[in-house]
Amino acid sequence: MYKSLSLSFMPCKAMLQPRARITRQDSENFVDYRTKVARNPTMERLQRNYLFPEISAREAEHMEKYPNAKVISLGIGDTTQPLPDVVASSMANYAHNLSTRTGYRGYGAEQGCKELRKAIAETFYKDMGIQGKEVFVSDGAQCDISRLQLLFGSNMSIAVQDPIFPAYVDSSVIIGQTGDVENESGRYRNIEYMKCGPHNSFFPNLSKAARTDIIFFCSPNNPTGHAASREQLERLVGFAQENGSIIVYDSAYAFYITDGSPRSIYEIPGAEKVAIEVSSFSKIAGFTGVRLGWTVVPEQLLYANGFPVINDFNRIVCTCFNGASRIAQAGGLASLSKHGYKAVISLVDYYKENAEILLETFESLGLRTYGGVNAPYLWVHFPGSNSWDVFNEILEKTHIITVPGSGFGPAGKEFIRVTAFGHRENILEASKRLRSLL
Amino acid sequence: MSAIHQNLSTAISSSASTFLGYNNLKNIKSSNVSLPGRISGVVKCVSSPSVEKTAYKTKVSRNENLAKLQAGYLFPEIARRRNAHMLKYPDAQVISLGIGDTTEPIPEVITSAMSMRSYALSTVDGYSGYGAEQGEKQLRAAIASTYYADLGIEEDDIFVSDGAKSDISRLQVLFGSNVTMAVQDPSYPAYVDSSVILGQTGQFQKEVEKYGNIEYMRCTPENGFFPDLSTVRRTDIIFFCSPNNPTGYAASREQLTKLVQFAKENGSIIVYDSAYAMYVSDDSPRSIFEIPGAKEVALEVSSFSKYAGFTGVRLGWTAIPKELVYSDGFPVAKDFNRIVCTCFNGASNIAQAGGLACVSDEGIKAMHEVVGFYKENTAIIVDTFNSLGFKVYGGKNAPYVWVHFPGQSSWDVFSEILEKTHVVTTPGSGFGPGGEGFIRVSAFGHRENVLEACRRFKQLYK
């Protein structure tokens, strides 16, 4: 990805920052002319590269350093198992039909094809009152998170869990909702960080949380793996109602729940008036490269002036987007068919078994390990340490890529995230190496 | 028949998109040209729920930028009109020359690559997860060498997208709310609408049908559809589409040289939309980077939509030269890369496999055939309107024909054509005040439908 760039290591003040900086040392020299367009100050505000390309860069660099080592990636949450046949063949057939007169299709509805919207509503929101017309098919949750930020605009205040999947914070900075970063804490001003840790069972203390317009809430959580209970989500919805806030609920990992925790925010009464839900086929059907997801915006969700949020989101989708690939949508539909659904459940089960294996490994090492039960992520505690140091040590000694917890926020600094995505043999090999490490 | 069914299946869902939101219900009486004021009760516009006074409201304020938008996005409105018309006349054979939607099958060399990639994803060796957000290396290299050979644009300057429309908004997110922009008038509505959404503009000014703070560069028959740059104010960003949607005009080398010079003098950045470049028939430039010095002032957006029929498959690209830097020297590409990594997650790998086949030797040949087919359609439409005595523009370097109806409201003409010939077109004012008095006829369609539409035009205007 960054082959033309040089990778230089420099010490940095905040312990929370990664040690490596990727710089384009060549580019400054040959540019004589500069436009008079000012760089967007919000881009300037971003502290470093997006987390996951940074991890990729580290991986690439490590592989160059140790060309014979078998590097195992338990870092980026990237699916590894092939698509079920029924799903792949539906996409292959759809693609083939595009070369026929009767099978050719041009622009699709920007909101997604009707059949798929309906299937999503019926599969994931059965009996929750969510209809197909409230479902917007996307090319993935990461894209929709930014489209939601475009929808909300720069005059919003947001709250996030800490630690959390970095796209909420980064997109908030980019759209101009935040102030500068506080160097010591690594937090951006004007974002309410709701700490989630072992001390509060990974559910924020809402009585301490300031009111914000938007509350991003990911459950099961990336990176901690915690799935909020029904009682906790009832409190969250109540909190949102009291404050007149909108919850953006990220349920991308709902399929991994094993203990009966709610799979959708709409299982909570009243949520349809306060919450948007974002989800994805990435971790359900292995669609990380195929690109398909969805966002539910209930018709009952209203702005302060009574205007339905769905109307504006629809406008965004029609103007800033042109629909998910029809081929991907065909695959999505196949994955929700009778056979497809069964097949994706076994895909997910495979990763869940991986998680069990890793959980056992870390626990046997005497490490406090969270997650791994309702999500394909383990959140391993290394009290008193700096997660980038732990990341480096694990990488150096076992050739295993993980993700340092501080990449997800200040509250992650003593933790390492380990994903359960991988071929079984790699998971087993990684377990072996980890056991010998400590 | 298939055209109707095809249109129905693509359009039905979009009728759920509300064209007239709450704030526009007030505006219906004071109608203006860009808003189809005279609804005549046919179109069921509002699908928003009935809101009782006691309905719970959050305390979150609506984004005032969204409130500035005057109406729904143009093309869902055209779709809505078409659907309403089909309901009104269930036996009519409605022909759609409105939305620029491709109709001809994708060449097999391209679809078989996508089928193969789909199957490969179900195998251990062929499965791939997340791709590079900037696009698959091979595809980036192939786009660079196919479209920018000898122009100094390289593999790592190319960012593969899910289409030009998405990238236009990502570019707006990149630039932020504090930049000023200029557009051609008329122009593809996504530039203006995304600018409003990002907060770059002021309110809509009804008298002139323009948003405050946007510099509209009028393009008319009088100025040969190239703006008089001496009258154009400096803006940070200049959106420029050539060959142009909707006018069909392709700027000459000389004109683009002036544009590049203008940008250089003003320190502006040109966002050059070259989505129709393959339709150029004469020696008009196909890329802004053919102009010396353009790499320091321009980036280019393009798409496979109108070349390979990828309107539903979703694939395009943006090329950002390394030489393009902000006032502080920071490379624009570096920030765009950050946007792409944070706000996007790459185009679909299956679509990218199709893209790679598109730019193979066989694929390029096949795309030229498809483009050639639509160009023949265009010629038929141009001939028809010429023979009827109309002033006809475009149609030579683009799949759009820009027909002049002097002194008439373009929405009225649109409605009359629809009512009397059952042919859907696009009213010029939907593209900006400079489009008033024009109708855009798109040349995408099965040959028999294009011929039939032209027959009906001849009937109506003989």
Image (spheres, coloured by chain):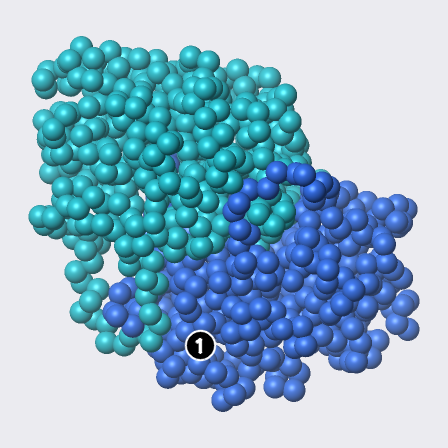
Chain colours: A cyan, B blue
Element assignment for label 1? loop
Q: Which quarter of the picture shows residue A427?
A: top left
- At which x and y percent is residue A63? 17, 36
Query: Is residue B287 placed above or below B99 in the rendered structure?
Result: below
Q: Nearer the viewer, residue B141 or B160?
A: B160
Q: Amino acid at mark 1?
A: Thr
Residue A387 appears in the rendering: yes
Q: Residues within 10 Å of mark 1 (few under 14, many from 20)?
A: many
Residue under the point 36% across and 68% down: B151
Relative horizontal placement of residue A257, taking residue B399 as reference (left or right): left
Residue A106 x %, y %: 64, 47
The quadrant of the image that shows the C terminus of chain A is top left
Residue on which disc 1 sits:
B235
Identify which residue, B429 or B314, lies in the foreground. Answer: B429
Left or right, A27 with reference to B433: left
Residue drawn 54% across and 59% down? B65
Q: Is residue A284 left or right of residue B134?
A: right
Number of labelled discs? 1
Which residue is found at the position 87% from the left and 68% from the top? B458
Q: Residue at x 18, y 69 (%)?
A: A29
Question: Is residue B365 in view from this perspective?
Answer: no
Classify B198 as above or below A402.
Answer: below
Q: Position of residue B126 (x, y in %)?
A: 39, 30
In this image, A27 relative to B446: left or right?
Answer: left
Q: Read off the chain for label 1.
A: B
| Position of residue A433 measured from the top left corner of the image (x, y, whole percent) | 15, 18
Residue B184 lies, with reference to residue A301, above or below; the image says: below
- Residue B38 versus residue B128 in the image, above or below: below
